[in-house]
Amino acid sequence: MGKIDFYQKLGTRFITKKPKSNPTQTGYARKIFVLYVIGRFGFSSKIVCQYALQLPREAINKLFRKLMIDGLINERKSFGSKDGAVYYLSAKGKRYISFETEVVFHQKTDTSAHNSKTEIHDLSIQICVLDRLLNSTEYSAFVTEKELREMGYGSWGELKKERSVDSLLCHADTRQWHAVEIETANSKNKKTAQHSIREEILNKYVNQLESTSGLYSRILFFSHRERFLRQIKSRTEEILAENKANYTIEQQSLINTELKYVNSFCPTLYQLFWDMDFKLEQSTHTNIEIETLNLLLQKVKLNDEYSDEFTAGYEQAISDINSNV
């Protein structure tokens, strides 16, 4: 569990939405943010970083173009999502972000193995995790599926048979980990004569939930369709009803109380990845304009031609706008 503790201590040190600093420091923080997200998750896209940083598309395009010119990231053309491309760290980018953050990133810089078929699923995980870290105070750290597999979960050693969940979020108050699972299809709920995939997954959840040394204490389900979440819940209830003797009272209680379905986030994922007419600026333009006003205010303060009364009026106007957002 030493590596898990490392990520818990790492927290959100390099995850920030709006660094309060001068333009040079802001640009540096955004560069580190993008490289850090790509390094932690394995790859990322413009729409993920645009959503997290709440920047206009033009600013994101400029940022990614600069990172490519500097040789820090590699572009991989893909049909998997609306962006049409994803980005990996280059060898230079991997060395740079490792030096700047003092975090070792274990990842291949070759983009040829990219799986476009699971791209939306993987990017949806990033959106869910970053949203919970940036837009609420409930969670304070995260671990990615890539990092869990590097530890052995679902891949090798004594943890090979454990399920490698899509991500982990650390609850800020309890310091317990909550698993994040993204469902973009109904295939895992189907039952055959030989086995039930959902039942196998459920048993692995129970194994972790009831263990005093379990990896997580709760599972959060996300999807772009509420229908998929309802199907998971219905199939889970069917499994309990059909195999009640196989689960203790305590296990049934854990299943009923610690499996949470986040229906409220479905519209966000749908708009970002499935609605071809949706433009992200529609939901972030207010913050963009306020940021522009703040930059203008800094210029006003540095200009001696403007009176203190003028500057105070400018500050009051921005304060009034912020209070109404």
Image (cartoon, rainbow, N blue to C red):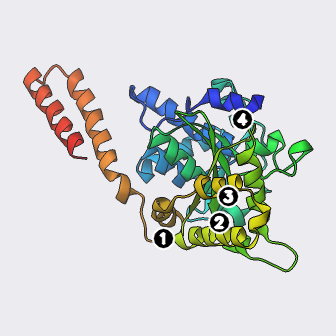
**Mark 3 residue type:** Gln
In percent of the image, x 70 and y 28: which residue is there?
A: 6
> Quadrant of the rendered structure where residue 321 is?
top left
The quadrant of the picture occupied by the N terminus is: top right
Q: Using the numbered discs, state the Cα–Cα distance from disc 4 to disc 3 in whole angstroms.
A: 45 Å
- Give the spatial CA distance, label 2 vs label 1: 14 Å
Gap in angstroms between the C-alphas marked 2 and 3 = 38 Å
Mark number displayed over residue 252: 3
**Is residue 185 among the parts visible in the rendering?**
no
Mark number for residue 80?
A: 2
Numbered disc 2: secondary structure: loop
The residue carrying mark 1 is 275
- Residue beneath label 4, please? 94
Q: Amino acid at mark 4?
A: Lys
Secondary structure at badge 3 equals helix
Could you say which is closer to the camera, residue 12 or residue 159? 159
User: Residue 64: horizontal and vertical position, in percent?
Assistant: 55, 46
Kindly report the distance in space between the C-alpha atoms of the residues bearing marks 3 and 1. 38 Å
User: What is the C-alpha distance between the residues marked 1 and 4?
Assistant: 33 Å
